[in-house]
Image (cartoon, rainbow, N blue to C red):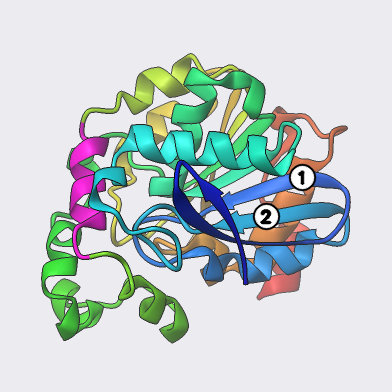
Amino acid sequence: MSAVVINSGVVHYESFGRGTPILFLHGWLGSWRYWMPAMESLAVEHRVYALDLWGFGDSDKSAERFTMTEYMLQVKNFVREMGISQPIIVGHALGAAVALELSHNYPEYVQKIVAISLPLHAGSIDRRLTTYTRTRTAGLARVFRWKPIPLKEVEQEAARAAPEAIAHSLESFASSNVIEQLVHAPCDVLLVYGEKDDVVDVSSTRELNDALPHLKQVTFSGAKHFPMLDQSSKFNRLMKDFSDKNTSLASLSLKEEWRRRTR
């Protein structure tokens, strides 16, 4: 386990590989751990990093840190402290929103973004998520009446979140103007959604698809809130294409040969 002190708080992270940097940011359910399949795939050509945001995993759990501003500054200072030069940032849900906040306020810290299961506003997030930490001893399956996390170990990591981390960060997220940040993003943003996302309502995202040259939306047919785990082979191939400096955003798609190989 690796850790660095940022703003007097301990930030847990893991890193390995060599090459251009990619930084992974988890969402409201889980920790850095669910990025392992993607990290192992991409570490062949990249230096990959994943950290636990404040209140999650093994990072500091002081309640005053559970805001979008604090998360943005945590990531900014982590990048600076580690000497990472303009990483590609891959964020899931909360992590995707944090990546957008960072690019909006400190564009020099971001090369480009993969935003997975990004809610466009607070109303598109299932309300049961806000009650999860208050009833988490019952387990996610009972709270949601279905199981939004595909792996048991990821669910166990979600249960380690600080009691108010999810609720407070959701409350802070409600003030974010995600659509404005997307429209005015200073870098390319690849939006990735699961067609059957059971935590974030994806119906309102369709209007963003190819709306601007720096935005591209890809939908994983049959995948839910964790498309990078539900269909990891397809996601990892998409990431390899996106991270290639010679690949244009417009040319990215879930190619037919990917589907044949991953059935």
Closest to the observer: 236 or 172? 172
Determine whether, in the image, residue 182 is placed left or right of residue 5.
left
Image location of residue 3, percent across then percent down: 59, 61
Q: The C terminus is located in which quarter?
A: bottom right
Would you say residue 222 is visible in this rendering?
no
**Is residue 106 found left or right of 94 in the rendered image?**
right
Residue that carries the numbered disc 1 in the rendered image: 21
Q: Secondary structure at mark 2?
A: strand
Residue lying farthest front?
8
For residue 63, above or below residue 102: below
Is label 2 in contact with label 1 (beta carbons under 8 Å)? Answer: yes
Q: Quadrant of the N terminus?
A: bottom right
Query: What is the chief secondary structure element of the magenta stretch?
Result: helix
Q: Which mark is residue 4?
A: none
Task: Tell me: 38 left or right of 58.
Answer: right
In three-dimensional space, the C-alpha distance between marks 2 and 1, rounded to whole angstroms, equals 8 Å
> Hey, what amino acid is under mark 2?
Tyr
The image position of residue 133, as x and y in percent, is: 18, 67
What residue is drawn where x is 64% and y is 29%?
A: 110
Sort mark 1 into few (<14), some (14-19) or many (20+) by Cα contacts within 10 Å.
Answer: many
The answer to which quarter of the image holds residue 55 is bottom left
Query: Residue 221 at what x, y percent from top left?
Result: 50, 59
Q: Which residues are magenta?
A: 163-174
What residue is shown with label 2? Answer: 49
